[in-house]
Each structure stands twice: as C-alpha cells, then as structure tokens.
C-alpha cells in the first residue's frame, strides 16, 4: 500500500521494482498475490493496461492506518488502548523527544474532550 500511496497507480512489476530499490526483494508472484488480496478486501482496484493491471489505492493512508490499528488493538491488546500505548512507550528506541511529542498529543486530546 505504501508504494501505491507514494508512487501512485502502479503495475505489480513497478511495485516489485520500487520495493527492490528499498532493499525488499520479493518475487513478482508474491507482489501480485498481495495486490490481489488487497483488491479483494476493497483496499485497491485496478485498470487493465494491455496485459498488465495498474493497481491504485482506494483508501488513503489515514483510513488504512485507523483500520489496521483497530484490528491490532482488538486482536493483540483485547481492546485496551492503555495496554497498546504502554507497549508503545516502553520501546527502547523511543527518544525523549518522541515521548514528549506523544505526551503533547495526549494532553491536547484531554483538553479537547474536556471542552466538548
């Protein structure tokens, strides 16, 4: 999905090449299978271009992220946002700057909900 968001509509071969340039080596059939699965789930569609299909995203990054986060929250954290955030902030690669930004986002949400 990231390749389609960043590069726009692409064939499976173009997605494969973009991933290869990022150091991700996948077989053409693997890329095509993933694109077809995403299409079956309603996340992408395609236009026929000769013998090739040009795939495009039909959901934006925020929609996809929200949907993925909901699935992760439900499946891995039993719906507990607190457990998810606790897991996130305990990651050793999070910097003080990252944590301060997260604290600012939480503070803004608290203030917003207090006003509502």
Image: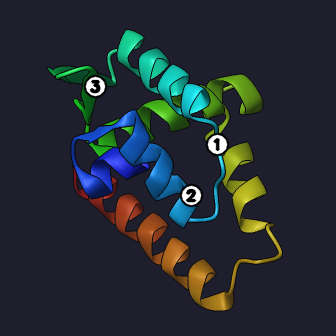
Left or right: 25 in relation to 37: right
Circle 1 packing at 10 Å, graded few (<14), some (14-19), many (20+), is: few
x, y (%) of residue 105? 43, 69
Across and down, in percent, residue 80 comes to 67, 35
Q: Label 1 near label 2: C-beta < 8 Å? A: yes
The image quadrant of residue 78 is top right
Image spot of residue 86 (x, y percent): 74, 56
Nearer to me, 100 or 3: 3
Examine the rendered structure and indicate whether residue 17 appears above or below residue 77.
Answer: below
Q: Quadrant of the N terminus?
A: top left
Q: Nearer the viewer, residue 28 or 1?
A: 28
Q: In this view of the protein, can residue 1 be seen by the observer?
A: no
Q: Tell me where residue 35 sits by quadrant.
A: top left
Left or right? Give the position of 76 relative to 71: right
Left or right: 10 in relation to 68: left
List the residue tagged with mark 1. Answer: 26
Q: Nearer the viewer, mark 1 or mark 3?
A: 3
> Toward the viewer: 78 or 52?
52
Name the disc covering residue 20, or none. 2
Cα distance in 3D space between marks 2 and 1: 7 Å
Q: What residue is pinned by disc 3?
A: 52
Report how far apart the C-alphas of labels 1 and 3 lie in the structure.
Answer: 18 Å
Q: Earlier in the sequence, mark 2 or mark 3?
A: 2
């Amino acid at each position: 999905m990231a390749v389609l968001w960043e590069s726009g509509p692409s064939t499976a071969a173009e997605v494969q090449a973009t991933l290869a340039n990022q150091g991700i080596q996948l077989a053409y059939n693997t890329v095509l299978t993933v694109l077809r699965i995403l299409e079956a789930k309603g996340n992408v569609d395609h236009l026929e271009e000769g013998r090739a299909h040009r795939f495009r995203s039909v959901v934006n990054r925020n929609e996809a992220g929200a949907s993925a986060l909901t699935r992760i929250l439900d499946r891995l954290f039993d719906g507990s946002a607190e457990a998810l955030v606790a897991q996130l902030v305990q990651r050793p690669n999070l910097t003080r700057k990252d944590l301060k930004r997260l604290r600012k986002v939480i503070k803004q949400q608290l203030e917003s909900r207090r006003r509502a």
